[in-house]
């Protein structure tokens, strides 16, 4: 049974989520602040984290930063569930490494679907790691066996979604992928990734690749491609 960590200080919301996810086969652990959530993660194994942003003490953004700095926890997929619906908050959450962002109030059915998609994408990424595939183009090395990207010799810290996008583009240099096609390819037709978040993930990939970010090109009105050699 897959375990989901819900980090939510509102008891009613947390219990509602736990009841809903429990009905579809998940084991749910609730923590009401980031400090206790982090303590649980040191000993517990989870398939995903559902994270509120407005928490007592350490807020959700700071918690994501803390997890991403911890090699043992950095790969755990995170879905932000927050009442904060400003574009700036959505962009900040995705750029920090969250896999998805869902705004409260939300449909529990949609939450379940997004959670399934995020876990499936993460599992596919792990399976890809085991295949040992390596791609090297223009100084960028993508190693699926280690889920690692290097820019020359520097490790590039990508989220699972960013890794999946870059891997798809690098496997097909010169081919233009529309946002819709990228969504279909990396999420398997589910609802966890949107056209809006694709743009945010592309921006994050470019920023993290520094000067090599220019290799991920925009084809105006069409989509994105990795520059062909």
Image (cartoon, helix red, strand yellow):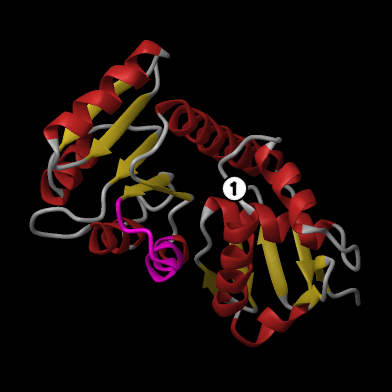
Placement of the C terminus among the 4 image quadrants: bottom right
Residue at image coords 18%, 37%: 40
Q: Is residue 89 visible?
A: yes
Residue 90 included in the magenta stretch of the image: yes
Say if 227 sits above or below 116 in the image: below
Mark 1 element type: loop
Q: Choose top left, top right, bottom left or bottom right for residue 68.
A: bottom left
Say if 227 sits above or below 157 in the image: below
Q: Which residues are magenta?
A: 83-93
* Image coordinates for residue 86, horizontal then vertical, percent: 39, 65
* Image coordinates for residue 207, horizontal then vertical, percent: 56, 79
Q: Which residue occupies the foreground of this view, 10 or 24?
A: 10
Q: Is residue 147 visible?
A: no
Residue at image coords 72%, 83%: 214
* Image coordinates for residue 41, horizontal then vertical, percent: 24, 40
Determine whether, in the image, residue 58 is placed left or right of residue 63: left
Residue at image coords 84%, 75%: 227
Name the residue beneath numbered marker 1.
Answer: 193
Q: Main secondary structure of the magenta part?
A: helix
Say if 80 sits above or below 117 in the image: below
- Callout 1 environment at 10 Å: few (<14), some (14 to 19), or many (20+)? many
């Amino acid at each position: 049974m897959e375990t989901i960590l819900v980090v939510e200080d509102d008891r009613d919301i947390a219990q509602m989520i736990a009841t809903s996810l429990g009905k579809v086969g998940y084991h749910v652990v609730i923590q009401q602040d980031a400090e206790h959530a982090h303590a649980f993660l040191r000993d517990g194994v989870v398939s995903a984290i559902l994270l509120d942003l407005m928490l007592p003490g350490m807020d959700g953004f700071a918690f994501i930063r803390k997890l991403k700095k911890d090699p043992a926890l950095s790969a755990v997929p995170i879905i932000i569930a927050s009442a904060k619906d400003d574009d700036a908050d959505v962009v900040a959450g995705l750029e920090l490494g969250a896999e998805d962002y869902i705004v409260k109030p939300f449909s529990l059915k949609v939450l379940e679907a997004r959670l399934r998609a995020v876990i499936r994408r993460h599992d596919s990424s792990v399976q890809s790691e085991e295949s040992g595939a390596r791609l090297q183009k223009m100084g960028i090395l993508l190693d699926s066996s280690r889920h690692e990207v290097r820019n020359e010799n520097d490790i590039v810290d990508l989220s699972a979604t960013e890794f999946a996008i870059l891997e798809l583009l690098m496997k097909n240099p010169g081919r233009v992928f529309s946002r819709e096609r990228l969504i279909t390819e990396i999420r398997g037709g589910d609802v966890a990734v949107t056209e809006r978040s694709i743009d945010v993930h592309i921006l994050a990939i470019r920023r993290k690749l520094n000067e090599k970010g220019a290799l991920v090109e925009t084809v105006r009105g069409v989509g994105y491609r990795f520059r062909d050699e």
